[in-house]
Amino acid sequence: MAARRMSSLLSSSYASPLLRSLGTYSGRGSSISRFSTAAALEEPITPPVKVEYTKLLINGQFVDAASVNSTCVNNITGQLIADVAEGDIEDVNRAVSAARKAFDEGPWPRMTAYERSRILLRFADLVEQHADEIAALEAWDNGKPYEQATSDEIPLFIRLFRYYAGWADKIHGLTIQADGPHHVETLHEPIGVAGQIIPWNFPLLMYSWKVGPALACGNTVVLKTAEQTPLSALYVSKLFHEAGLPPGVLNIVSGYGPSAGAALASHMDVDKLAFTGSTETGKIVLGLAAKSNLKPVTLELGGKSPFIVCEDANVDEAVDLAHAALFYNQGQCCCAGSRTFVHERVYDEFIEKAKARALKRVVGDPFKKGVEQGPQVDSEQFDKILKYIRSGVDSGATLEAGGQRFGSNGYYIQPTVFSNVQDDMLIAKDEIFGPVQSILKFKDTDEVIRRANASHFGLAAGVFTQNLDTANRMTRALKAGTVWINCFDVFDAAIPFGGYKMSGHGREKGIYSLHNYLQVKAVVTRLKNPAWL
């Protein structure tokens, strides 16, 4: 398979005449062209970083893929950044073999937990020293704003590794009182070789959520990056080895899901699997793990999170928070508040202000100062979002803002707002994963709880209210792994994250994530003539 290259232009777009002809285009949206910037039309800014690492990382060395295949990485214009080695089954086998040898024979699980902690801390320091280059790679590879990567994601990445460095020498078992003359203790042992598959929307953060706890517990890792966004993981993994990480402890395979991902999920010598991605792919991964060696699997999957604005809300504050909850990272966030439920008493006011905020959103080159929204990650995601926008119009929702491609180069989409959205519309049920806000009306608390829970997903929820009783009731009633009250997207290192229902199994971050990478062993020793029991 030759290197895959994407064209710099896409022919598909949905022009305003089409939307007007369908009769659901809001007259209030006549100023849709007034988005805050035409930065997407300008000459792209050259990212301040050089791509140095494009090979697979196996056993501490950057190596070519076994085949001649390579996958291309596309920047904000849709043009080629670099050819990156594309791993397949043979490469996964090599990586797992290196990880197995490093676990069974190497120093990592045998060194003191304190020394492992020091290596993790040295790594965090190196990332901090190279923060600008890493943020630039993340923005270039993914399309997210450079300012977002530098101010939000790199600091949290560093914090996650320092957090788990602190846990490394505090993992211990229990001494248990038995009913007879026995000494009973539990040992918390590293599980072995951990296979990890991360998505393209937050490459570095997902790296930290998985690699941090796995290494703190003394495991070795084979990590498959998303084919769209391998660059930042390769760069930081080089820094990890500079920090003193032994060869084979962390292996990086760039590649596609049906080849490299499937090989990792079904590998008989992988002891644990962690996956973040779509619910559909999560089902496949879970099946492959079960059919092979029945390895335990942690799944962080899709969402359709409700953001509930109650009748007592400060509308201006609620609009800003709901906007951030949906549009952050181009809407490419699994927990995005993509079902905005607004009480009928404040609904009309909320719609007008939500539309105005969307029209002010700064869309453009992610390396330009002040840009809030860059391009979608690739042509596939771009086309998918535009199809959902057309579906919203076709199903009778009112298009208040956006709805079209932004500019002519790259994969930019206008921030889009729909009102009069009904629960049975696809834009209210499916995970769009793009900058499309669907605003629904509700009458009372009982109704909105029922409707918010009427989803296959249960990843997160947001509630905006000044009433403590309302907040407490919704906190307990909403079937979601995280409920944010008067805030959203708070991702401190210690806060666990994961879903209910089809949003996944297990939790990441915090102390709960350590449980994913440990085995519990009971040790029972008979006591002869004990002085006490």
Image (tube, rainbow, N blue to C red):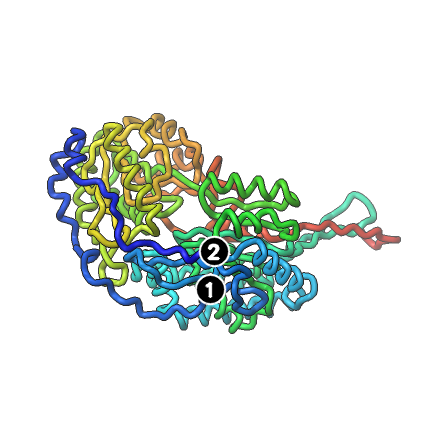
**Label 2: which residue?**
225
466 versus 173 height, above or below? above
Q: Choose between 495 and 278: the one closer to the eye.
A: 278
**Disc 2 residue type?**
Thr
**Disc 1 residue type?**
Leu
27 versus 323 height, above or below? above
Residue at the image position 57 percent from the left and 61 percent from the top: 215
Label number found at residue 224:
none
Q: Secondary structure at mark 2?
A: strand
- CA–CA distance in space, label 1 to label 2: 9 Å
150 versus 384 height, above or below? below
Q: Choose between 22 and 69: the one closer to the eye.
A: 69
Residue at the image position 54 percent from the left and 49 percent from the top: 274
Corner quadrant of residue 98: bottom right
Residue 20 location (% of width, % of height): 15, 33
Would residue 398 be found to the left or right of residue 425 on screen?
A: left
Regarding residue 354, the answer to whether it shows in the image is: no
Would residue 222 be found to the left or right of residue 531 on screen?
A: left
Point out the tag, 1 or 2, that comes first from the N-terminus.
Answer: 2
Residue at the image position 28 percent from the left and 51 percent from the top: 411
**Label 1: which residue?**
234
Q: Are marks 1 and 2 in contact (CB under 8 Å)?
A: yes
Corner quadrant of residue 171: bottom right
Q: Secondary structure at mark 1?
A: helix
Residue 12 location (% of width, % of height): 25, 43
CA neighbours of label 2 inside 10 A, class few (<14), some (14 to 19), many (20+): many
Residue at the image position 17 percent from the left and 55 percent from the top: 38
352 versus 62 height, above or below? above
